[in-house]
Amino acid sequence: MKEENLVIVESPAKAKTIEKFLGNEYLVKSSFGHIRDLDKKNLGIEINNNYKPNYIISPDKKKIVEELKKLAKDARMIWLATDEDREGEAIAWHLYHVLSLTSEKTRRIVFHEITKDAILNAIKNHRFIDTNLVNAQQARRVLDRLVGFELSPLLWKKIKPALSAGRVQSVAVKLLAEREREINSFKTSSNFKVIATFTKPGQDDKIIKFQAELEKRLADMEISRTFLEKMKGAEFKVSDITRKPTKKSPLPPFTTSTLQQEASRRLGFSVAQTMAVAQRLYEAGKISYMRTDSVNLSDSARSATAKVISELFGKKYLHTRNYKTKTKGAQEAHEAIRPTNSDLQTIQGNVSDRKLYELIWKRTIASQMTDAELEKTTIRISNSKSPDIFIATGEVLKFEGFLRLYKESPEDDSEEESGNLLPPVGKNDKLFPEKIEASEKYTAHPPRYTEASLVKKLEEMGIGRPSTYAPTISTIQNRQYVIKEDRAGDVRKCKILTLSQNTIHESVKEENYGFEKAKLFPTDIGLIVNDFLEQHFDSIINYNFTATVEEEFDLIAEGRVDWTTMIDKFYRPFHKKVDETSKTGEKIKGERLLGIDPESGKPVYAKIGRYGPIVQIGDIRDQENKPKFASLLKGQSLEKISLEEALKLFRLPRIIGIYENSEITVGTGRYGPYIKHFNKYYSLKKGVDDPLKITLERAIELIEDKRKDIKNKIIKSFSDSPDLLILNGKYGPYISLDKKNYKIPKSKNPNELTLDECKQIISVSERKTKKKK
């Protein structure tokens, strides 16, 4: 097999796609990602040996490495075809060393898309491994290991076990913590928005009707009432009309971050989901490389896009453009994310793949289309009783341009620009007020971050890079420093004054506010860890420092800075600070004195306990009377809980009644609020049931619903073996025994299985599991 070419990529899907384009003389194999990493048992870095990394082959990769070594030995030429970014370069470098390759028979090839032309072109223009890119990746890996390895034990000592810190993840938590406190300290105020509904006789005796808004907001209800009194009997006329032609240009093609943001807003994808789907599309050869901060399109891509626009919409819709990357610290500026074949409007595959591909296709095509042409009309309306002006604005789309194909979604918590059509009116036309309404409007606190808006903020600040956004956001959620969830809003009353037929009517309207959908909330432990790091390690979670580190990685990638020098400059003062902090101060519990319990006269505290946030009555130092503890409920936080709310928690667990001659108890534990009946536990519904308010009737309803679910779930049971059940699951019928589940072969009918057949299926499954281990 000496004449064989061995091509090594990092994923099986990529290998499968590349295999289609290369002849029989090429064998394509996958390394399944990184084959080695820093030693996890120890620090994995020899600090006193110029920060030399100690890499070990991952146990699950040993078999793959053996196979690749054998194939490499027999091959005439080895082509390292891992991804084109720093991570891909590092994988190629590790393969080169672990497989004991030589420069004579090793080639490094990179391509921005997995197409036949791109791969054949890469083979023609092969190069060797770029050690500068490898060093930039090593620097990031080593720096992050040093920070995590030294800060995490400090957090265990000072706060609680199993915590961790990271250079980028801690900065992301800091952003969320600052926003949360900004929201908590926000003072809501209200003012009055005044909208008039005007009429005017039109052609054919038709009445023209439209609305206009007073150009200023009024401070309060009394000022609003005074204004409406003044408007009684006022005459209104059109004082000015301006029509201004405007243009709207398409946004550039997607980068990693803009794709994550738009997929979140438009498709409801999480950042991690977007990257997983984009990876599949790239490896299947459908889109170009999905980790990029470039908005550039290649000449061939622009040419192919122009052809599609001309064929689908005509030449008047074509406007080719070159976009320039403006992102702070942009790196690896190859090309934007685009389809590899512009003719392909949709693809085969699952719903997520199709939706994301179509979004990428539309955005790419639209970026090369003409501007949309609009006419913005502003009508100013004066009155005879005051100098105040009412304004009506509207837009008319004169030429749709790129909007024919793609309309950008509005950003979080923003409203789309109004496209109201205004009626034909002329200057000095007399208008008749049908009604003038002053309605109370409340100011809104700054919006909480979504995954998409957090990515946007990190990118704007130069923190992280395309490859780091998704793992950073996943990490802070996995560590439970941040939770992503919906939160129910509240209802408030808004006052309304309406002037109609020279009479002012007063009314009240209820409005829902404060509803949060898929927002990121820092947890109590996240806030405490952030406060500790800010107090002792402000230089590490400083925004400018974190962005500067990214710039230094870029300089290493360009060969302008030595990576070990950069690490040393950071590590020496950092390590000294860790030592100093470790020797000083007590444990940090985020403790807050809420007040005094009126019954016992003892202090009440809110703080972090072993399993999360708790409230406590009494003092731990009191040897005679041990303190009482209660867990916080969902939605409560250490920073906001009041004494009254804390004392209510000590009513739990509470007995709410008797059912079937047994008490029903309501309580709260590590996994949230529950009902206990006959020593069985039933979870309360999130956002629906309050353990402090739940009634006996509602508790019985939850118990019966659960019983019904269990009954419907059971397909078959056996009197000789009551613990063995055949159940209906999410993915079909299965056998359950001793809290273990066993798949039923498709050839078997679950309803006809005997006890012996079930035991036989369990026995075969156990043997297979042992063999795999």
Image: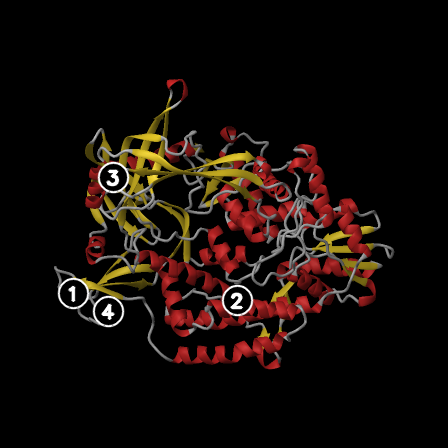
Residue appearing at x 42%, y 43% in the figure: 415
* Identity, as a three-letter code, of the amino acid under mark 4: Ile
Looking at marks 3 and 2 on the same chain, the residue that comes earlier in the sequence is marked by 3
Looking at marks 2 and 1 on the same chain, the residue that comes earlier in the sequence is marked by 2
Examine the rendered structure and indicate whether residue 547 appears above or below residue 428.
below
Looking at marks 4 and 1 on the same chain, the residue that comes earlier in the sequence is marked by 1
For the view shown, which residue lies furthest in the top direction? 204
Q: Is residue 518 left or right of residue 505?
A: right
* Identity, as a three-letter code, of the amino acid under mark 1: Lys
Examine the rendered structure and indicate whether residue 526 appears above or below residue 27.
below
* Identity, as a three-letter code, of the amino acid under mark 2: Ala
For label 1, the residue is 602
Q: Position of residue 594 (x, y in %)?
A: 21, 62
Q: Position of residue 767 (x, y in %)?
A: 58, 47
- Foreground mark, 2 or 1, reads 2
Q: Would you say residue 148 is visible in this rendering?
A: no
Describe the element under mark 1 as helix, strand or loop. loop
Tell me how far mark 3 sits from mark 1, CA to CA: 65 Å
Q: State yes or no: discs 2 and 1 in contact (Cβ < 8 Å).
A: no
For label 2, the residue is 547
Q: Is residue 444 left or right of residue 622?
A: right
How many neighbours does mark 1 have within 10 angstroms: few (below 14), some (14-19), or many (20 or more)?
A: some
Tell me how far mark 4 sits from mark 2, CA to CA: 44 Å
Q: Is residue 569 left or right of residue 414?
A: right
Q: Would you say residue 88 is visible in this rendering?
A: yes
For label 3, the residue is 385
Q: State yes or no: discs 4 and 1 in contact (Cβ < 8 Å).
A: no
* Identity, as a three-letter code, of the amino acid under mark 3: Lys
Describe the element under mark 2 as helix, strand or loop. helix
Query: Of residues 684 and 62, which is closer to you in this image?
Result: 684
